[in-house]
Image: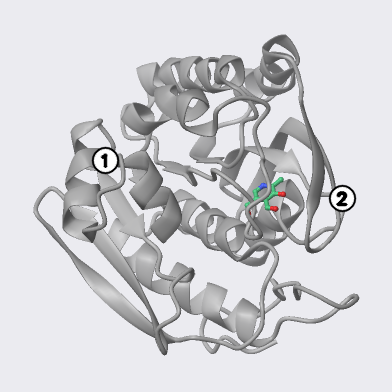
Amino acid sequence: MKRASVLVFAGSDPSGGAGIQADILAITALGAHPLSVITVLTAQDNDRVFSVHPVSAALLQRQAQPLIDKIEIAAVKIGIVGNRANAEAIAEIVGTLRLRQPDLPVVFDPVLASGQGDRLAAEDAIQAIGPLLPIATLVTPNLPEAIALCGGDRRADRQAEALLKQGCRHVLIKGGHGDDENVINRWFTEDGGRSWTWPRLPGGFHGSGCTLAAALAALLACGKSMAEALDLAQAYCHGALTNAYSITDGQSIPNRFVSIARGKA
Ligand code: PXL
């Protein structure tokens, strides 16, 4: 039986909570196959990032080439890229793939810092990700990222408008970083959108954003529409957080082995 492949560009998180380790689990759990190109090595635990080491753009390209030469890519997921040179290399690879698949879905999680505010790029993160906004089908910033990417504007509709103007087709602004009772995630697209309200779960999680973006890429790879993918991926992510487990004190690890239907482990 053939599985749809998701080409992932993301950083390694040795703690197993976030980054490509999270993406591999979420994509596998949702029935697609992860092809994992590592952009950055990090030194971190479940709470703090201690250092960030981008691979060279040539090594990034070297990892991707045998995959794109042989395997049909059904979706692309982009997490942290480390620097501008890597962002440019990824944009070029996506450009090549789109010559034969103009509709290839690309999910871009524009991570500017870890959940605790630690740096995840070797350069200015906003500068670094510039080439990726125009090629994204869907961008998934959290509230601080949406504000930072839009020059400080605090209104979600104006943030989304600014991002859509840069060329991406859909924007999901995630409310997880607020402190209201509920988390509101807002979807904006050229001709509409909608919002979802989730009860805010107690405690902190390491890798929730990666889990959601990877789940979205897997569902789009499996042929779901954007509206369906957004619906199912959030339900899956909420289930993964509800069933999160602890490995030490501090942030918990989302449990990616939950069923999409019931959000149960
Ligand atoms: O959750 C954002 C993120 C993405 N990628 C890597 C990370 C983190 C957060 O820590 O470490 C590699």
Q: What residue is shown with label 2?
A: 14
Residue 253: give its label: none
Residue drawn at 33 percent across, 67 percent down: 228
* Residue 69 at x, y percent in the picture: 62, 18
- Say if residue 10 shows up in the picture: yes
Residue drawn at 41 percent across, 90 percent down: 181
The residues bearing labels 2 and 1 have C-alpha atoms spaced at a distance of 32 Å
Q: Residue furthest right?
A: 248
**Could you tell whether 139 is left or right of 7 in the image?**
left
Question: Could you tell me which secondary element the residue under label 2 belongs to?
Answer: loop
Q: What residue is shown with label 1?
A: 163
Check the image and report above or below for 20 versus 182: above
Q: Are marks 2 and 1 in contact (CB under 8 Å)?
A: no
Crowd tier of the residue under label 2, counting other residues whose Cα lies within 10 Å: few below 14, some 14–19, many 20 or above: some
Question: Could you tell me which secondary element the residue under label 1 belongs to?
Answer: helix
Q: Residue furthest top?
A: 58
* Residue 41 at x, y percent in the picture: 81, 35
Q: Does label 2 point to a residue whose CB lies under 8 Å from ligand 1?
A: no
* Residue 139 at x, y percent in the picture: 38, 46
- Say if residue 142 shows up in the picture: no
* Residue 162 at x, y percent in the picture: 21, 40
Check the image and report above or below for 150 versus 185: above
Residue drawn at 74 percent across, 22 percent down: 63
Q: How is the image coloured?
A: one colour
Q: Amino acid at mark 1?
A: Leu
Q: Nearer the viewer, residue 145 or 207?
A: 145
